[in-house]
Image (spheres, rainbow, N blue to C red):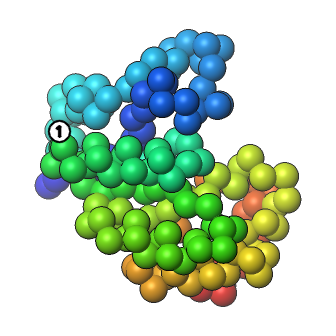
Amino acid sequence: MAKIDAHFHCWQLARGDYGWLTPALAPIYRDVAVADWQAQSAPHGVTGGVLVQAAPTEAETQFLLAQADQNPAVLGVVGWVDMLAADAPARIEKLAGHPRLKGLRPMLQDIADAEWILQPAVAPALRAMADCGLVFDALVKSAHLPHILTLAGRH
């Protein structure tokens, strides 16, 4: 039976995407490559994984997709898109053209309004995700959970 890591990260600090990643987080405040993940996971029989965004930028999503292009062990990517952008549906459709993009993850845990995801302005992006067959990955705190349930009921 194949072992798949459903959620791992890689990053390059010099990219400047990771405002949350500071020297105070010393154990992980370093570049992390797909090869680093493979070195840690392969001895446990893990043969592939899903690379998940760690920054709220589309540039990072493109970086992750490039990593997937270079490594067949990256079975999928969960990226990020600005869901409030007027052209969010077009951006989502373009990203979804990459065969390894499997979903999008808004970083809701950093948004003070726990109901943010329910606002009408986000609906076109959510529809585009569904139309493109992308999954919604929820990075939340406990205050968001009732609203995620409401969202799930809508879609």
Q: Residues within 10 Å of mark 1 (few under 14, many from 20)?
A: few
Which residue type does callout 1 highlight? Gly
Left or right of 71 in this view: 82? right
61 and 4: which is toward the camera: 61
The number of callouts visible is: 1
Vertical comparison of 60 with 89: above or below:
above
Residue 21 seen from this side: yes
Give the position of the C terminus as an image quadrant.
Answer: bottom right
Q: Is residue 58 above or below residue 21?
A: below
Give the residue at x 69% y 68%.
Answer: 84
Residue 28 or residue 18, whichever sits in front? 18
Q: Which residue carries the number 1 mark? A: 45
Q: Quadrant of residue 40?
A: top left
Q: Is residue 131 above or below residue 51?
A: below
Q: Quadrant of the N terminus?
A: bottom left
Q: Is residue 77 left or right of residue 80?
A: left
Residue 27 appears at what percent x and percent y? Answer: 51, 15
- Please provide percent x and percent y for residue 86: 66, 74
Q: Specify whether 66 is left or right of 122.
A: left
Q: Where in the figure is residue 10, as x and y percent of width and height?
A: 39, 34
> In the rendered view, would you say 90 is above or below 61?
below
Percent position (x, y) of residue 35? 23, 29
What residue sits 62% from the left and 61% below the top?
82
The structure residue drawn at horizontal position 37% and vertical position 46%, both measured from the top left corner, is 64
Q: Secondary structure at mark 1?
A: loop
Let me know if residue 6 appears in the view. Answer: no
Q: Residue at x 41, y 22 (%)?
A: 31
Q: Nearer the viewer, residue 101 or 93?
A: 93
